[in-house]
């Protein structure tokens, strides 16, 4: 069966290394975005609608056409994240293709198998045309399903040697490529064909 394949991009790096800025550039022209935005960053960008309740997120996500939505949840973050993932799956599958951004996954997942609706989204969302940008400062503390299913890795400067070693082991990017990075420098690894490129963010 022909499917419209999405991508799962895993983005890693220490605080202020460039993760959010890279995703912002990558999705510069994306018509439909639904972001998990607990720090209220994406919601502040021009063109984004800030949703703070489940109902508001649901109503936005069910609407057709171009729109950028940021879910700024409070309370039980893990439960809210699960709800967000279900909404993304539904919107991508039944409304229109969508790009999903998940900020700081170490706060809402663990190294165990990806939980609930997030697990469903990363295992089944891609073939429904959903592209996922999964961000964490520390993937050794975030879910391994995303790392295992990633089609692309964008690796910025890591905060510790342990993180460098973890990513080298999980991604097959040579350790030496990852350990010398300066802030805003990154390694861009295509996990499907093995290509490695280096880059630096410029504003
Ligand atoms: N539009 C911009 N112009 C100039 N500098 C920018 C711009 N956007 C981000 N930066 C700078 O780039 C660096 C990386 O920022 P970014 O928000 O991408 O970090 P991050 O890796 O997402 O960090 P965190 O894990 O804390 O969210 C910061 O020093 C930030 O001030
Ligand atoms: Mg960030």
Image: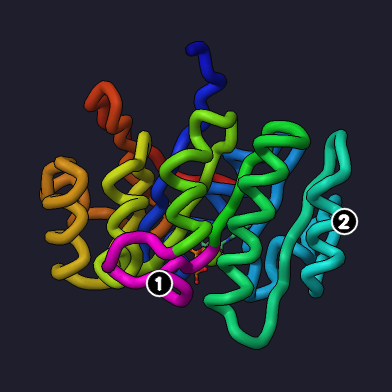
Disc on the earlier residue, 2 or 1: 2
In this view, the residue in front, 3 or 49, is 3
User: Where does residue 166 sit, x and y in percent of width and height?
Assistant: 16, 60
Q: How many marks?
A: 2
Residue with the most extreme top position = 2
Q: Determine which residue is flagged by label 2.
A: 59
Give SS at disc 2: helix
In this view, the residue in front, 19 or 54, is 54
Res. 29 visible in picture: no
User: Where does residue 98 sit, x and y in percent of width and height?
Assistant: 67, 38
Q: Is mark 1 within 8 Å of ligand 1?
A: no
The answer to whether residue 191 is left or right of residue 30 is left
The stretch in magenta equals 103-115
Determine the image quadrant of residue 58.
bottom right
Determine whether 123 is above or below 83 in the image. Answer: above
Report the magenta stretch's main SS: loop
In this view, the residue in front, 146 or 10, is 146
The circle drawn on residue 77 is none
Res. 59 visible in picture: yes
The answer to whether residue 140 is left or right of residue 20 is left
Give SS at disc 1: helix
User: Where does residue 31 sit, x and y in percent of width and height?
Assistant: 77, 35
In this view, the residue in front, 66 or 63, is 63
Determine the image quadrant of residue 93.
top right
Q: Determine which residue is flagged by label 1.
A: 106
Residue drawn at x 35%, y 54% as measured from the top left: 156
């Amino acid at each position: 069966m022909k499917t419209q394949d999405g991508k799962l991009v895993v983005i890693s790096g220490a605080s202020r290394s460039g993760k959010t800025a890279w995703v912002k550039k990558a999705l510069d022209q994306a018509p439909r975005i639904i972001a998990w935005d607990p720090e209220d960053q994406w919601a502040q960008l021009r063109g984004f609608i800030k949703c703070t309740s489940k109902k508001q997120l649901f109503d936005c996500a069910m609407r057709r056409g171009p729109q950028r939505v940021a879910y700024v949840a409070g309370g039980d973050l893990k439960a809210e994240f699960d709800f967000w993932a279900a909404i993304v799956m539904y919107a991508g599958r039944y409304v229109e293709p969508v790009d999903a951004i998940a900020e700081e996954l170490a706060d809402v997942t663990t190294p165990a198998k990806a939980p609930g609706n997030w697990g469903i989204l990363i295992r089944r969302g891609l073939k429904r045309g959903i592209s996922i940008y999964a961000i964490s400062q520390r993937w050794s503390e975030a879910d391994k399903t995303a790392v295992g299913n990633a089609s692309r890795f964008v690796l910025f400067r890591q905060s510790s040697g342990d993180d460098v070693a973890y990513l080298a082991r999980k991604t097959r990017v040579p350790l030496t490529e990852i350990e010398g990075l300066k802030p805003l420098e990154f390694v861009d690894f295509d996990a499907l064909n093995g290509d490695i490129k280096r880059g630096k963010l410029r504003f």
